Amino acid sequence: MTVYNFSAGPAMLPKPVLAQIKEDIPSFQNSGMSVMEISHRSDLFDNVIADAKNDLRELMNIPDNYKILFLQGGATLQFTALPMNLATQYNHIGLIDTGHWSTRAGEEAEKIGTEVTTVATSKNNDYHQLPEYTDDDNRYDYIHLTTNNTIEGTAFSKLPKTKNVLVGDMSSNFLAQQYNVEDFGAIYAGAQKNLGIAGLTVVIVREDLIGKKPLPSMLDYQLLANKNSMLNTPPVFAIYAAGLTLKWLKDIGGIAEMEKINRQKSNQLYQFLDQSKMFNNLIKPADRSLTNIPFVTGNKELDQELIAQASDRGLVNIKGHRLVGGMRASLYNAMPMEGVVALTDFLEEFEAKHLEEN
């Protein structure tokens, strides 16, 4: 039985990447050492991290005046690191509230004494759509935005206009759809959804925004950039896996081609949900995510039955987040169209069976 993993993260990896990892586990590039054993100070790893940075810069058209950091601690640690590094003039940031993870970003910033103002929110609509935002103050060090909301199922396809520096948490649609890096002062993303395995976080930051004050070493973007992300032992294996994923993405045509594929995949599922008599996606169509699609029946017992039967069919991890319930299909880059077709076929069968019985 073929298994399709719809988990919100850690997510499935591309098959060619898994095959290469399997080959490199015993001996990396005929070194006699496993890829999990190579030193971060070795020439072998120098090539790995350099290739990964160069490929990422090429894929995202990252200008030379932006630093690329490969860090640990998850995107959650960046909720703290970002204000420490960037909120240096006013100690005040604006938050566009689109759900759980944007709220968490604000809460963590406040813990270190940064003033946080919610400049727009869609909480009153249960986060079923994105809020409208216009600048109301230019005394923010930056405006924080979550480009894709993993739990709620919304995403920005068009960025809000701001005179302030824009910072984007891009964790769940990083490399899945196109954005202009120069529209942001900083971008950050956990790797475990579209870039590889858990344990790696990417930060892309404009160099004129960092190095403003001394900070604890492991949270200091300038120091980490000066040390090529190797102030301590970096997540070697995770960076290696990310490098393979970036090469796979280049091979299929880059981010523009990946976004085209992701739109085809998401349309397959949205079209079914929109005509369904049993399932509902509650998100405003213009604000729908390409990568995370929540849906419900309105009946918790029926949801549980569906989740169990789906798992028996090899359609695993479609249980919705505990905050919203129901189901969720995460269609990250490595999810093939065949997996989405298998899911919609199953949902169609499940619906027909239950409508017939009732």
Image (tube, rainbow, N blue to C red):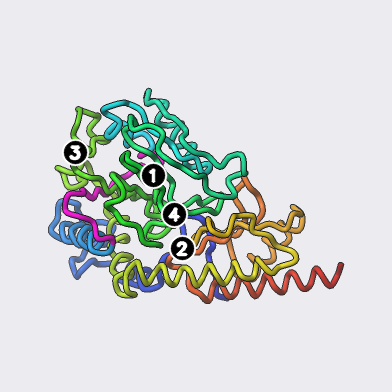
Q: Amino acid at mark 2?
A: Tyr
Sequence order check, earlier mark of 1 and 2: 1
Sequence order check, earlier mark of 2 and 4: 4
Q: Is residue 81 left or right of residue 319?
A: left
Q: Give how far apart the Cα atoms at labels 4 and 1 are.
A: 11 Å
Sequence order check, earlier mark of 3 and 2: 3
Q: Give how far apart the Cα atoms at labels 2 and 4 are.
A: 8 Å
Residue topped by disc 3: 222
Residue topped by disc 1: 75
Q: Give how far apart the Cα atoms at labels 1 and 3 are.
A: 18 Å
Q: Position of residue 118 (x, y in %)?
A: 47, 33
* Tag 1 secondary structure: helix
Label 3: few (<14), some (14–19) or many (≥20) C-alpha neighbours in 10 Å: many
Q: Amino acid at mark 3?
A: Gln
* Tag 4 secondary structure: loop
The label number, if any, that marks residue 241 in the structure image: none
Q: Is residue 39 shown above or below 355? A: above
Farthest-out residue, right: 358
Q: Position of residue 288 (x, y in %)?
A: 54, 58
Q: Are marks 2 and 4 in contact (CB under 8 Å)?
A: yes
Q: Give how far apart the Cα atoms at labels 3 and 2 are.
A: 31 Å
Residue topped by disc 4: 172
Residue topped by disc 2: 332
Q: Position of residue 334 (x, y in %)?
A: 43, 67
Q: Give how far apart the Cα atoms at labels 4 and 3 are.
A: 26 Å
Q: Is residue 71 magenta?
A: yes
Q: Are marks 3 and 2 in contact (CB under 8 Å)?
A: no
